[in-house]
Amino acid sequence: MQDGYALELKHVSKNFGNVAANHDVSLNVRHGEILALLGENGSGKTTLMNMIAGIYYPDAGEIYINGERVMITSPKDAFYYGIGMVHQHFKLVDVFTATENIVLGIDNGEKFSLKSSAGKIREISSRYGFEIDPEKKIYNMSVSEKQTVEIVKVLYRGANLLILDEPTAVLTPQETRKLFEVLRKMRDDGKSIIIITHKMHEVLTISDRVAIMRKGEYIDTVETSGADEELLTEMMVGKKVSLNIDHPEPHDIRERLVVRNLSMTDGEGVRVLEDISFSVFGGEILGIAGIAGSGQRELLEAIAGLRRLDGGDIFYFDPKSGEKEDLRNKTPLQIREMGVRLSFVPEDRLGMGLAGNMDIVDNMMLRSYRKGRTLFVNRKNPHKLADKIVSELEVVTPNVNTPVRRLSGGNVQKVLVGREISSSPTVLMAAYPVRGLDINSSYTIYRLLNEQKSNGVAVIFVGEDLDVLLELCDRILVISSGKVSGILDARNTTKEEIGRMMTKTGGVDEND
Amino acid sequence: MTGSVIIQFIQSSIAQGTPLLFGSTGEILTEKSGNLNLGIPGVMYIGGICGVIGGFLYQQSTTKVVPVLAVLIPLIFSLAGSLLASLLYCFLTVTLRANQNVTGLALTTFGVGFGNFFGGSLIKLVNSDVPSIALTKIAKAYKQPLPFADKLGWFGEVFLSYGFMVYLAIILAVVASWFLKKTRRGLHLRAVGENPATADAAGINVAKNKYYATCIGGMIAGLGGLYYVMDYTNGVWSNNGFGDRGWLAIALVIFSMWKPNLGIIGSYLFGALYILFNYLSVNIAMMHIIQMLPYLVTIIVLIITSMRNKKENQPPASLGLSYFREDR
C-alpha cells in the first residue's frame, strides 16, 4: 500500500456560466477499492469526473494523487498520473481494429509494431479476464466489446485509477455480471475504481464505499456494507423542496390517449421499451420520471409517429366526437390528417424541434407550411404568430428574423413551446422542456403547461427534477430500463418512493 | 494491333496516367486527414506554372543549361507554389474553419486563373508567335529515360523509357500506402480523418495533422502539374492545356477507394481510357464521349462499393467536416 489516498479532492468547484455544476466537493478514493458515485441526473457526477480526467479544469479546489498535489489540465496529464476514464459515449474509431484504437496517440519512443501491441493487449486481457480479439474491427463489435476495448485502452496506458461513467447503462445483465468480475479482479490487483451508476442494486453489489452527490454538492461517503437502498435513496434525492408551482386539481378529466402493451426495439435490436401501458387524460399533467435513457425519448417518439412499434396499441379519443382512433404505426402527417392535434416538444430542441439557421418566422412555418394551396407561401400569418409568441412569452431576440440558433437556450425553448401550443393541441408532449433554463424561463414554461392543462389538454411532461415533477404533475409514471415500474399519484407520494422505483431494474428484481 | 502500337498505347497511357497519380496520391493523403481539398486541380495548375516560371528564369539566365539545375530549380519552384496554395487552404479551413467545398472550389478557380495569368504573361514576354511558351532544354532534362532503355527491346520501351517523374509518382504512391498502413503517424493521421474528437482525446494534435497532410499532399499533387508541362508536353505551356486532369485525379481517389497503391493501377487505366479514342476509328465528336469513360468507371466503382457497403472502402468518416473541440 502506498501512502495516502489514491485520489483526494479538496473543495473542488466548477461553474458553467451562472450554473454551479460542482460546489465545494471533497472526496477521496482509497487504493484497491471500488467507489460508487451516486446521484441523480444533473447532480454533477460526470462534471466532477471530467475534471479528474483532464477534460475540464476546476475553478477552485485541489486534487491530490497519492498524497501529492497535482494539476490536471489535459487528458494527457491524466494519463501521466495514471488516471483513465471510460466515457459513456465511446471514443473509438470505427474502421480501426481494437489494437489500433488502443495504441492510438501513444508515442513512447518504442518501435511501432501492432503485433507486439496485440500481444500486450492479450496479456492484459488474460490477466483480468477480458474477452477481446485485438484484430477485430470496432464496427463489428457489440456494445460490450467496445466497452472492453475502452477499458483495455486505459489499462494499456498504465492507469491505476479507472473512472467508469455509467458502464452498465448499455449492458445486458449477463454482460454486467462479467464486467463486475473484471472490476473485482482489477481491485484485487490494487487498482482504484470509481464507478458512476444510477442502479441501486449494482451499487450495493459492486462497491466498497458509496459517495453521494446531490445538485452539484457532495453529501457523504458511506461504507456499502452498512448501507441499504433506503438510506442511499434518501441521501440521493434529499428532502422535499417547496417550489411554489401552481398545482390546480384537475377537473373534468377524460381519457384522451391510451397506450397498451407497447414494445419497441432500437436499430441495433436492443429492446428499449417493453410492455408499456398507461393512459393520459385531458385536463391533467402526466409526469414521466426515470433515469436518463430509460426509454422516455423512444416512448414519446413512438406516440408522435416517429418510430415503428414491435407490438402494442396507441389509441386516441377525440374530445369532441369521442371517436376512437388508432395511432399505431402512423406517420406524423397521417396522424395530423386524422385530425389528431398532437404537439411534441422534443428533447433535442435544435435538432428535432427547430431549424437553427432559420429565423423565428420560418420556424413557425415548419408547422403550417401545408396550409394554403398557392405556389407561394404565406408569410403573413406565421409572422403574426411569431410576433405574438415573442411578445407574450417575452422572448429576448433582436427581431423575429433572427436565426433561432443565435438565441439563448431559454428563448429557443420558448419559441418551440410557443409554436407547439399555438396549434391548440389536444395532446402536448414535452421532453425535458426546462433543461438548461434559468428559473424565470422555467416558471414561464410551467405556467404554459398549467394553462394547457386547464384548457383540457392532455399534457405529458418528461422531467428530471423530482421536486418539479411532484409539484407540477397530477400523476407520475415511473419508467425504469424501458419498463413501467409504477404510476403514482403525485399528491400522495414522496421523492424517495419515486427514486426507488426509478432505480429498480424493470419492475421486478432480477436474481443475479 | 501490332506490337509497336501496343507498346505505344501503353506508353501513352502511362504518360497520361502519371499526372493523375500524383494528384490522387496527394489528395488521398489530404483526405485521410478529413480535408476534402477540391482545390487540387488549382494546386496542380499552380504547381505546373510555378515550375514553368522557375524553368523560364533559369533558361533566361544562362546559356548552358545544366541538367541537374534544370530539374531542381523548376521542382523547387513548383513545390513552393503548391505549398503556398495548400497553406492558404489550410488556414481557411482548419484555422478559420471555413467551408471546405467552397474554399476548395475557390482555390481551383484561383489556381487556374493564376496559371493562365502568369502563363499569358510569359508568352507575352518572349513575343512568341504561338500562344504557348516552350522550355525544350529544361524538358530534355526531365525526359531523360533510364539507362539501357533503348537496348532492351520491348521491355526497355515499356518499363524504362520514361523520365524520372513517372517513377517518382509510383514511389510516392507506394510510400504513401506504407505510411498510412504501417506507421504510427499514419495511424494517427487516419484517426484524425475518421474521428477527430477521438484523436483529440487520445492526445493527437488534430490541426497539425491536417496542416501537414494537406500541405504535403498538395505538394505531391503539384508535381502532377509539373510533370505535365515538363515531360508530357515537352516543356510547352499553353493556357488551359492541363484541362480537366485535376478533376480526374479526384475521381481517381474515389476509384482507388482511398488506397494510394491501387491508384497506380487506376491512374494507368484512366490514362488508357482517356486516350482510347486515338486507337478507335471514331470522329472527333466521339472523342469527348470516350474521354468521359474514366468518370463512368468511377461511378460504377461508387455504385459497387456502396452496394457492398464495406466500411474500409468508404471515405474517411469526417471527410469535409471542420473540427472544433466542444467547450461543453
Image (cartoon, coloured by chain):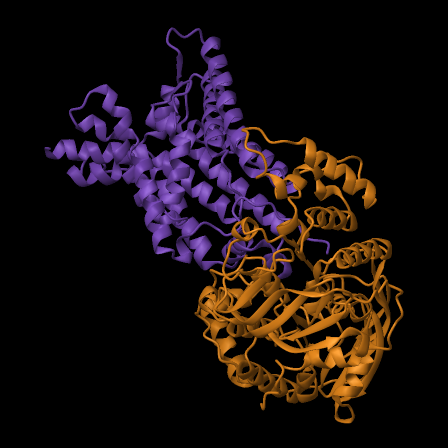
Chain colours: A orange, B purple
Query: Which quarter of the picture shows residue A279?
Result: bottom right
Which residue is situated farthest in the bottom direction here? A225
State whether residue A98 appears in this view. yes
Residue B288, relative to residue A41: is it above or below? above
Provide residue B306's location: percent of width, then percent of height: 37, 51
Which residue is situated farthest in the front direction here? A321
Residue sitting at x 71%, y 39%: A360
Residue A20 located left or right of residue B46: right
Residue sitting at x 41%, y 26%: B66
Provide residue B286's location: percent of width, then percent of height: 23, 24
Task: Identify the image quadrant of the C terminus of chain A.
Answer: bottom right
Residue A298 located left or right of residue B71: right
Residue sitting at x 84%, y 57%: A443
Residue sitting at x 41%, y 8%: B128
Work out whether residue A26 or residue B306 is closer to the camera in this orientation and state it. Answer: B306
Task: Identify the image quadrant of the N terminus of chain A.
Answer: bottom right
Work out whether residue A243 or residue A426 is closer to the camera in this orientation and state it. Answer: A426
Residue B180, relative to residue A68: is it above or below? above
Provide residue B90's location: percent of width, then percent of height: 59, 39
Q: Number of marks in the image?
A: 0
Provide residue B71's location: percent of width, then percent of height: 42, 30
Residue A422 located left or right of residue B158: right
Query: Which quarter of the picture shows residue A231?
Result: bottom right
Residue A174 located left or right of residue A164: left
State whether residue B162 appears in this view. no
